[in-house]
Amino acid sequence: MKKLLVMVGIALCALVVAQAVQRTYRLIINAKSQSTPAIVVGGKTYVPLDALRAAGVGASLSGSTLTLTLPSASTAQGGANQNAAVEGCLNEWLFNGLWRFRVTSVQPSSDPPGWKATVEVRNGSRADGLALAGTGWGGMRVILNDGNAVEVLSDAVEVRDQPFLQGAGKTLTLAFPSEETAKTPSKLFLLLDPRGLAGTSLRYSVPDPSFRVRLDCRK
């Protein structure tokens, strides 16, 4: 009988919580969708503890006290050895104030061995004749799951030096040659240095205008 009462009590508590929830939000942390949603109760939004941990927040329970430790600035930016950048998923348009960029696929390649990536670049500024080479181009690379980088073939001259009219864009497939084909690409970077705009009236809308595309998620 006591066991039945406990089970009924748990069920009633769950029902009360469910009725109190006024809304839920799909939760995405660092471009990765979380299985547990954020919930709104009493006009306040609550994020699950496991989601905070996924965002790098340290959490520890001691008796009735929950202690949270926020990540340092370097951790929040991806770590001391990782570039800060405008980040997104496959098939997601990213924008840094001048350029729109997205990656639609990264596939294994046999000729040359390595990988091929289909990317789209679009002039999102109000300037005509904008070229990546004149706005701080720093290269394009694929990062493998072991952290090694594979540079794009021939420094992607076909897109690097291409002038784009306002609103114009280009879709192309680029090769990233490598003998490490047993490994898995995890990210694709398009590196841009804002100092490349020195002497012009152009400005990026973010401190680091590089693009980082996570290949483990898709929009």
Image (cartoon, grey):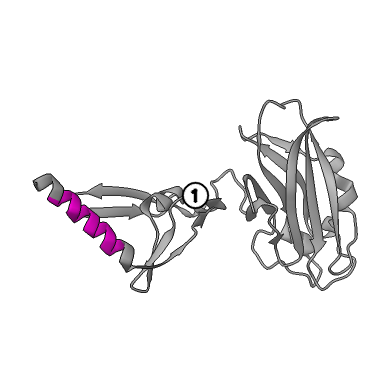
Q: How far across and down, in percent of the image, does residue 77 sit?
A: 55, 53
Vertical order, 116 against 42 (above or below): above
The C terminus: image quadrant: bottom right
212 left or right of 168 in image: left
Pick the front one: 22 or 66? 22
106 left or right of 64 in image: right
Looking at the image, can residue 106 be seen?
yes
Pick the front one: 110 or 137? 110
Vertical order, 189 against 184 (above or below): below
Residue at position x 58%, y 43% in the image: 81
Q: Quadrant of residue 193?
A: bottom right
Q: How far across and down, in percent of the image, does residue 129 sit?
A: 90, 66
Q: How far across and down, in percent of the image, does residue 42 sit?
A: 33, 73
| Amino acid at circle 1 | Thr
Looking at the image, can residue 85 be seen?
no
156 left or right of 107 in image: right
Residue at position x 50%, y 59% in the image: 26
Per the picture, the main secondary structure of the magenta-coloured stretch is helix
Q: Quadrant of residue 178?
A: top right
Vertical order, 171 against 100 (above or below): above
130 left or right of 65 in image: right
Which residue sits furthest left?
1
Which span of residues is magenta-colored? 5-17
Q: Quadrant of residue 148?
A: top right
Residue at position x 69%, y 54% in the image: 211
Q: How far across and down, in percent of the image, does residue 205 sit?
A: 68, 68
Q: Secondary structure at mark 1?
A: helix
Image label count? 1
Pick the front one: 14 or 110? 14
Quickly name the residue at label 1. 75
